[in-house]
Amino acid sequence: MSQSSLLITDAVAVVLLVFVLYFPRYRRRDMVVALLGINVSVLSVTTVLGKSTISAGLGLGLFGVLSIIRLRSNELDQEEVVYYFSALAVGLVCGISIDPAWASPALIGAILAALYVGDHPMLFRRARSQTLTLDSAFTDEGALIERLEQLLGGRVRRIKVRRVNLVNDTTVVDVRYDLITDDTRSTDDSTQAR
C-alpha cells in the first residue's frame, strides 16, 4: 500500500474514532485534542523512522515513555485509555507500510469495530459501577448489600469494601450493580413465581 493511501486511511480512521465513536459518547473536548495529537504524532514519527537509519525500537520506546507520562498526568477512565491507545495504534499501523497491502486497513478496521461493539451504549446498558462512601460502618456484608441496593435502585452484583472506619462511622465500597427497570422487575417477578 502506498504511503499516500496509508495517510488517507489514517485520516479517515482517526476521524471515525474521534468524531463518530468517542466524542458523541463521552463529550470530552480535551480528549479530542489528545486523540488527534497522539495519532498524528505517532504517524509522523513512525513514517520518518520507517525511512531513516534510526532504530524503530528507539522511536517506539520514546513514544511509549511519552504515552505513559501523558496517561499518568491526568486521570482517565478505562474507556478513554483504550481510545487513547487506539489512536496511537492507528497512527503506528498507518506509519509503517506492510505486506500484504490489505493488512493495514484490515487491522484498523478491527480496531474501530472492537471499539464500536465493546463500547456500544446498548451493550450491558444497565450495568453500572461506583465507588461510594457511606455514612455508616458496615461489617455485615448482607446488610451492606441491602443498603446499597436500596440506595442505588439496582441489584448488586459485586462489592469490594475499600475501607471501614469504625471511629468516623463510614464505609468506602466499590460496587458493581445492574439498574432495575420495569422490564427487569417483571422478569424477576415471573422467575420468583415459578
Image: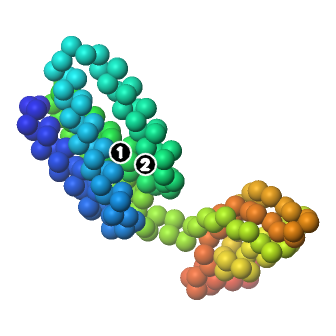
Depth check, front residue: 160 or 167:
167
Marks 2 and 1, Cα distance to the nearest angstrom?
A: 6 Å
**Amino acid type, mark 1:** Ser
Foreground of the two, 188 or 116: 116
Cβ atoms under marks 2 and 1 closer than 8 Å: yes
Return the x and y of residue 108 as percentages of the image width and height.
27, 42
Residue at x-position 29% and y-position 20%: 56
Q: The N terminus lies in which quarter of the figure?
A: top left
Task: Report which quarter residue 177 is drawn in.
Answer: bottom right
Name the residue nearer the viewer: 127 or 3.
3
Q: Secondary structure at mark 2?
A: helix
Residue 71 seen from this side: yes
Which class describes the residues within 10 Å of circle 1: few (<14), some (14-19), or many (20+)? many
Residue 106 drawn at (x, y percent)? 24, 40
Mark drawn on residue 184: none
> How is the protein colored in the picture?
rainbow
Q: For mark 2, does the 10 Å Cα neighbourhood hold few (<14), some (14 to 19), or many (20 or more) residues? A: few
Question: Residue 69: x, y in percent?
Answer: 46, 39
Residue 104 visible, this angle: no
Residue identified by numbered label 2: 82
Q: Residue at x 15, y 30 (%)?
A: 101
Q: Position of residue 88 (x, y in %)?
A: 33, 41
Above or below, comparing residue 178 to residue 10 in the picture: below
Q: Quadrant where the C terminus lies?
A: bottom right
Residue located beneath label 1 in the image:
86
Q: Residue at x 29, y 16 (%)?
A: 55
